[in-house]
Amino acid sequence: MLARLDRAARAAVPAASIVALLLISLVPWIGDRAAPALAVAAVHYWAGRRPDLVPAPFVFLVGLTHDSVADAPFGLMALVYLFVLGAARSQRFLVVGQPFAAGWAIFALIASGASAIAWAGASFYYGAALSVGAPAAVLLLTVLTYPVVAAALAVLDTAALKGSA
Amino acid sequence: MQEHRAGPEVKAETPVQATLRRAMFALLVTIALGALVIGKAEVYVFDWVKSAVGDLLAPVLHTVTVPVRAARDIGSNLGRITALTEENARLREENERLRQWQALARRLDGQNRELRRLLRFDPGEEVRTVAARVIADTGGPYARSLLMDAGRRHGVRADQAVVSGEGLVGRVMSAGLRSARVLLITDRRSHVPVLAGPRRVHAILVGDNGARPYLRFLPRNAALAPGDAIVTSGRGGVFPPGLPVGDIGIATPSGGSIEVVPHVDWTRLEFVRAIDRDSEGFAAQAEE
């Protein structure tokens, strides 16, 4: 019984870390109002490492929660997170065994795609081409902070999920 | 830096499981796209969901906000320690100047009361406000709003004006039981009737999701200069008249849009107050 609980708790680590990073990124803490999309980085990391522990319905719900709290067009961030999940899942075998920079470059590509989808979706929703300055700032911060997020998640990964599958 | 590691071997999916997973993925993408399209019609149920999620997460966001703010403040304060002596001297000087203003304000307040008494003017009750902490700054690139930790239970209602100590923040867009969403004056959906400059020209302050909103519907002969004050006009009944909003920033030479620099420092916004427009004080102000 205890062993089963322990396994369940460990399996919940990716989901819990995604939710925690989402909440942290929504807290008013960064001065210039452009905050890195930490949850996007987390979804990418776990989709590459443990896709079985980040199912699409969960990622969809995280996206809807983000939409709700951030007052984004409903469905927009759900779409973005699903894109990141699908893209990272399909790319995971490309980066295995490669230097970290390769994984980082792929993340930058996927995050750029996600940003483009978010911009296009929001422009469609508001019926006007929105400024690209703010999304570009978010993208830049997200890509620059990825190594820190990935390193922190790697610590969790090693501590909680090592060897479990 | 570390090498990209392989994840532990995940159990291989059967063809049926893989098909189901792909079908589920496609279904979720379709639902998200559908929600985006339907949401354009301002579907009420989506607002309700957003409000409910905000309510549900309000205690969690409140808990997360406190340590994160503390960490941020420690970081920024460390940088300022070196400038403390200088700042202290500046504050003393400012304090002295403010004392003089305070004395003047008291004298004018006394005169004001006396004149009102002579006119038998009934100011009604003081305007009631509901103070709240900002628990989520949802100022992503596509919307400028925030969540505050007071809702209907505390007397917050939709369309109440929201201010900080510095000036107008925005208006309550939707109020949940324990939380409320505030549409900032910088959001592209925000339209605030204002008076601009010393000649008190009527205009509408419109946001564009950037840091600075701009003025629209100005008369052609409106002569405005950088630094001119912008205050709410009170037209429309949502915002009480006379709330300080900001100053004129840069006016484009072509006579196009005129930027406004808000008084509110969005980076330091921690507490806000919603103005209860049902209170008698609001009615009295609006009639003035």
Image: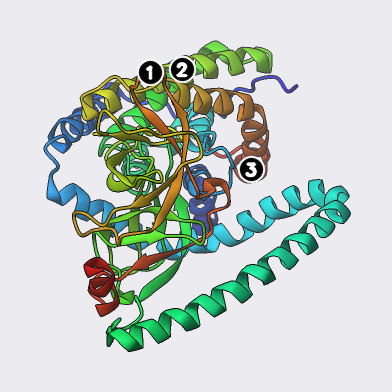
The chain holding disc 2 is A
Q: Residues within 10 Å of mark 2 (few under 14, many from 20)?
A: some
Q: Is residue A30 left or right of residue B201?
A: right
Q: Quadrant of residue B274?
A: bottom left
Question: Same chain for the residues at labels 1 and 2, yes or no?
Answer: yes
Compared with A8, A78 (above or below) is: above
Q: CA distance from mark 2 to mark 3?
A: 26 Å
The residue carrying mark 3 is A156
Say if mark 1 contacts mark 2, CB within 8 Å: yes
Q: CA distance from mark 1 to mark 2?
A: 6 Å
Q: Residues within 10 Å of mark 3 (few under 14, many from 20)?
A: some
Q: Is residue A115 left or right of residue A160?
A: left
Kind of residue indicated by mark 3: Leu
* Residue at 34 percent of width and 67 percent of height: B275
Q: Is residue A78 left or right of residue B110?
A: left
Secondary structure at numbered mark 1 = helix
Say if mark 2 contacts mark 3, CB within 8 Å: no
Kind of residue indicated by mark 2: Ser
Callout in the foreground (3, 1)? 1
The chain holding disc 3 is A
Query: Quadrant of the image for the N terminus of chain B?
Result: top right
Query: Quadrant of the image for the C terminus of chain B?
Result: bottom left
User: Between B13 and B148, which is closer to the camera in this rendering?
Assistant: B148
Count of marks overlaid on the render: 3
Residue A112 bears which disc, if any?
2
The chain holding disc 1 is A
* Residue at 12 percent of width and 44 percent of height: B43
